[in-house]
Image (cartoon, rainbow, N blue to C red):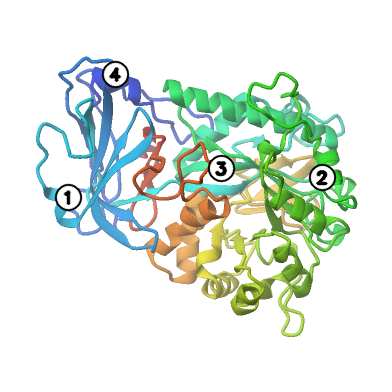
Amino acid sequence: MKRSAEEASLLVDRAAASSVAAPCSSDATPHRVSMIASSASTSLMSTSHHNMSSSSLSSSTTKSTNNNSNQSFLTRFINARLLQRDGSLERGELTVDSSTGIIILIRFDSQQHQPLQDNTDNNIDHNQQISHTVDCRGMILSPGFIDIQLNGAYGIDFSNGGCEDNHDDDSAANNSRNNSGLCIHDIFQVATSLCQSGVTSFCPTMVSSSRDTYRRVLPLIRNARRQQQQQQRDNTKIGANILGMHLEGPFFDPSKRGAHDERHILAPSKGIVTVKEVYGLNQVQQEENDNDVDYSSPMLEDIDIITLAPELDGALDATKSLTQPSASERNVIISCGHTGATYEEGLQAISHGATLLTHLFNAMNPFHHRKPGLVGLLSSKSKLASMGHQLPYFSLIVDGIHVHESAVSMAYNSHPNGCVLVTDAMSAMGLGDGVHALGDMSVNIKGDRATLTGTDTLAGSVVSMDTCVRRFRKFTNCSIGEALLCATLHPSNVLNRSVMQERATEAPIGVLEIGARADLVVVTDELDVVATWVNGKIAYDGRKLL
């Protein structure tokens, strides 16, 4: 499709300035361009599409006449096609309370064009006022993308514990970074930069690491998450939400370890006891304001997902303990990966609580008509139902390298509602060709291919989530909405975050529904990211994409 672009004003009044954040550049080292000004404007560019004579996404500000400090200001998105849970795209508008970061109103079709009187609706009280209107010009408004497996990006490695035994590297700069280790600033840099690819939430992921590295990195990322939550409340910084960690390893079949360091691979022979020992998990009951808890130690609350090989000694016991914990503990999502498990062992894993398969096809036995392995679980709906279980979710790295497009299409058509797109990106994402680090390992990048230096072993990917979404649609010939679901609703379902839980303290993500978080991305029909909002605030304006 031939592209065209035109500028549109983004006018932000001083009265609304406190609830609007500056956007991030798409450069590897982000810089901020202020969008907060009185009687000033900046341009927001987008591509032409969907029979629209004007291709821009524009926004305007309605000036407030009420200086009540208790008044909250609203952002309204109009002329949008809103992604629904079934993958359909419905024309309508959506309103966000920028002070809480929550979606408070959605209207569809004919309701969209009903006139507003004094910027109020039946759903909006007298202390709320539309201060910012974004005209999506017929483009798609989707929940922000959720990446549940991200090892790092933009030169940052989440497994970098500052280990003293790093391998030799041709880059002195990389050695310096490895020796200093991960810091909170690094984590924020990744969170900010991810918004340019439409990602609004991510699980920082660690490859198999030393016990000392787990003890340093888990509390560090927890502290970064808590600082980010405070910054969001204070409207001081915007970046993709830091979710709980995905610990990929070290409980793997050594023959399926892939790019993971064999020195760290072991079996959870004592079940949950081994898991807690390896990760250094604080076993004291974690009560709020409990002065006896050592918050400098890793905690179960730090972890969203653990990938392990279910056939190992103690793995099933660990799986049951982590997915069906006591009332005082938090449950963890268990995913089967880097495994030589048979089909029957996969069934056992699911019966013990596993609900996910990590990067399907990679680092597991291939499908065979007499030995289907874990891949065979995707066509076992009736058998699993007879056991009282559902089909597992499965993640796919759709970079065009890890999995052939035919296998991508086969897996998706076997279980479309279970498909979850992940980048499995490592620190070199966004940096280009060269030698980079993955934990203690050296990785060579050439184009979109990342391999352990001196080998042909794949070592994660370097493609962004929006690229995965575009390639997934091309490989499967699914609809636009169906492709978007695999990066939004489905990963949210994996994390049990698509609906409000009884004991949950955070709003749902991955859906466009009243009461959900206003983590949003505007995309074209070609699935190019135009703009991103996190917690109801602009995080990326898309100008650098064109």
The residue to which callout 4 is attached is 70
Mark sitting earlier along the chain (3/4): 4
Q: Is residue 135 left or right of residue 100?
A: left
Give the residue type at disc 3: Phe
Q: Residue shown at 59%/76% (left/top)?
A: 381
Q: Mark 1 and mark 3 in contact (Cβ < 8 Å)?
A: no
Mark sitting earlier along the chain (3/1): 1
On residue 202, the disc is 3
Mark sitting earlier along the chain (2/1): 1
Q: Is residue 401 left or right of residue 284?
A: left
On residue 112, the disc is 1
> Label 3, label 1: how many angstroms apart (C-alpha)?
32 Å
Give the structural element (helix, strand or loop) at label 1.
Answer: helix
Q: Residue shown at 46%/26% (left/top)?
A: 232
Foreground mark, 2 or 1, reads: 2
Mark 4 neighbour class, 10 Å CA radius: few under 14, some 14 to 19, many 20 or more: few
In this view of the protein, which residue sits in the foreground, 20 or 165? Answer: 20
Label total for image: 4
On residue 275, the disc is 2
